[in-house]
Amino acid sequence: MAVPVVALVGRPNVGKSTIFNRIINERLSIVEDTPGVTRDRIYARASWLGKEFRLIDTGGIDMSGEPLTVQIKNQAEIAIDEADVIVFIVNGQNGVTKEDEDVAKILYRTKKPVVLAVNKADNPEQRQNIYDFYTLGFGDPNPISGAQGTGVGDLLDEIVHAFPADAKHEEDESVKFSFIGRPNVGKSSLVNAILGDERVIVSNMEGTTRDAVDTKYHDEKLDKDFTIIDTAGIRKRGKVYENTEKYSVLRALSAIDKSDVVCVVLNAEEGIREQDKRVAGYAHNAGKGVIIVVNKWDALKKDTHTMKDFENQIRTEFQYLSYAPILFTSAVKGQRLDQIPELVSKVYDNRQRRIQSAILNDLLLRATSIAPTPVVNGKRLRIYYMTQVAVQPPTFVVFVNDNELLHFSYERFLINQLRDTFDFEGTPIKILPRKRK
């Protein structure tokens, strides 16, 4: 099944961000003793007892002009929709408040597990003073201190215990690909044009698509099954005011997680924006296959150099995606849409590619003769052996005399040698140094 989602829910200033940071063991959410602080990020991967999950921090979003109860209701309802497990956080130093009761009323309607955490129970006396919270109706309260870490391990035990059991299902062997990008670049139009029907709502208003929608179809030409995933547009962080828009980012990231290949969609009319590079970075960092799709190509006035100039600009702005093929399309005119499944299929196959160790070491011998290994502080890098250890993405281990001597520039040289010798178009390649014992 998919990675479980855990949402931290509660009124402002109960310590959700502190607990969020404590669980992920990293300071991602901005923490201040002020209700409604806007954080930079609201999601992260976490793990406990070997079980991974995605953690969402729902609080502290400034929605000026809206009553506090509306904020709480929006946060709780979105969390109910997204989460497998909900952690209801209250402030042990304030006792049960009217706002806590409002959140509880919303959570009563869900059939999902709710774990009650009483935060700011920083000393033994405060940890004993939790009985009033039984009145909220969610079983035993878990006294914790987000600031000190007391009780957080016990809380995580409760959370992991509430995860849904792995569902048994038939293995899905379809090739899964998604469209990601800023709002209004034409992702939904591309989905509809490929599928040939109005499967996804299309509108010129930014942010129309809220959810990631999975659609399976069979490509007769390729005789292959695909699952196409449309995603909500990813807004620039500073412009994500609505809770629902922030969860659109989460859903897009979840779609990337599920995808074999990600199509990064650019708007030809608007050109390349800084946010386009951030969006593409999500897919690259996840190790997915990547295709750059320039949509709305029909809207441009073109000459013989327009496509080449645009491609050069992409290569300059997206240097870390030098491996990604570029496709210029128009969902409205149907231009080159048939090439998208073909490219997706090819990139998918490249992500599965395995190279025998003997062939890799022949390549390594040629590479080191072309460019001898570097000398760092009087010590030369020696590479003894190369072998492939994984696919999706292709991952290679090189056994060396000292890991620190494998500079990123020589690592990039080895990756380029792999690309020049084998077809790895569309997929990132990872090289991991290991010191030979």
Image (spheres, rainbow, N blue to C red):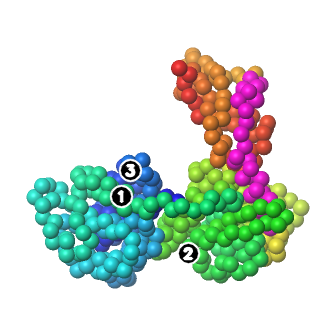
Dot 1 alpha-carbon crowd within 10 angstroms: few under 14, some 14 to 19, many 20 or more: few
Q: Residue at label 3?
A: 48
Residue 18 sits in quarter: bottom left
Q: Is residue 343 above or below residue 207?
A: above
Tell me the kind of residue under disc 2. Answer: Arg
Q: Residue at label 1?
A: 161
Residue 197 forms part of the magenta stretch: no
The Cα atoms of the two marked residues, 3 and 2, are separated by 30 Å
Residue 325 sits in quarter: bottom right
Magenta residues, dominant SS class: helix
Q: Is residue 328 visible?
A: no
At x 14%, y 55%, the residue is 123
Q: Is residue 312 above or below residue 233?
A: above
Residue 353 forms part of the magenta stretch: yes
Q: Residue at label 2?
A: 210
Judged from the image, the secondary structure of the residue bearing numbered disc 1 is helix
Which of the two residues, 322 or 345, is positioned nearer the viewer here? Answer: 345
Tell us which disc is closer to us: 3 or 1.
1
Tell me the kind of residue under disc 3. Answer: Trp
